[in-house]
Amino acid sequence: MEPEMFDDSELYVPIPKIFHSVYEDGPFSRCIVCSTSLLDETCEYMIEKVFRGTEVIVEYAMCQTCAEQLGGELSAESTARIERYLAERVDWAGRLRRLTELPDETLAGDDIEPWIDRCLVSGEPRAGLHSYQICAKCRGPRLERTLLPFMVGGPVTHEVGKLLSKKTRDQLDDFVGDYLGMDPTLVDTPIDTPLLVF
């Protein structure tokens, strides 16, 4: 979705609590990789949170520079497979149409539920999922409402995990171990596939 599809008052909204850090008890303040301040008005960054039921299992925020660098290190094979997977399963034009046709009061407010109420790929309602991940793009203290934020259910991340090459899997395992402080061998497959592969 191009930003001009929404006017400025609709595009950026205050970051809702579901995208706050449970560990910082408020908005994420630092990039997990380089520690740059995220709350500067010009800083663009991604937030990912993984839920099992109502419990947050994994959460992090990463500045755009680090996200692009990490994404660029993924194998070409994995990137091509994921792009093909999404192209075959996600109706981006339909998503754009549905979001731009939301009621005026939704677009004028700061509601993000229509963006994350169903799995981006399967369409399954979030309420029916045992595990899921949510991802958002932010700038400083505000969240961008375009094609993001979105939610992906555990079954989909499991499928995406199967598409990854050994090189990409090893890189993501390193990320999980180095920055999330977790032993990748002890983490369930739906959890250890960060949405940065998307």
Image (cartoon, rainbow, N blue to C red):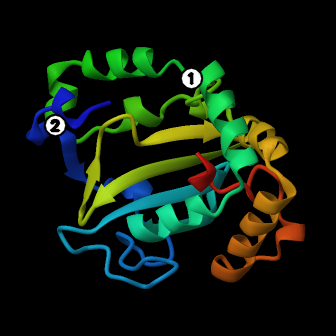
How far across and down, in percent of the image, does residue 148 sit? 40, 40
- What type is the residue that disc 2 sits on? Glu
Viewer-proximal residue among 42 and 19: 42
Count of numbered marks = 2
Is residue 171 positioned above or below 125 on the image?
below
Residue at left offset 31%, top offset 81%: 37
Residue at left offset 35%, top offset 69%: 27
| Disc 2 residue crowd, few under 14, some 14–19, many 20+, Cα 10 Å | some
How far across and down, in percent of the image, does residue 57 sit? 66, 63
Mark seen at residue 162? none
Assign the N terminus to one quadrant of the image: top left
Q: Is residue 21 visible?
A: no
How far across and down, in percent of the image, does residue 120 sit? 55, 30
Q: Residue furthest right?
A: 185
Residue at left offset 37%, top offset 57%: 17
Mark seen at residue 90? 1
Is residue 60 positioned above or below 100 on the image?
below
Q: CA distance from mark 1 to mark 2?
A: 24 Å
Please give the residue where the numbered disc 2 appears in the rendered image. 10
**First in sequence: mark 1 or mark 2?**
2
Is residue 120 positioned above or below 47 on the image?
above
Q: In the visual, does 54 lie left or right of 43?
A: right
How far across and down, in percent of the image, does residue 149 sit? 41, 42
Which structural element holds mark 1?
Answer: loop
Q: In the visual, does 151 lie left or right of 38?
A: right
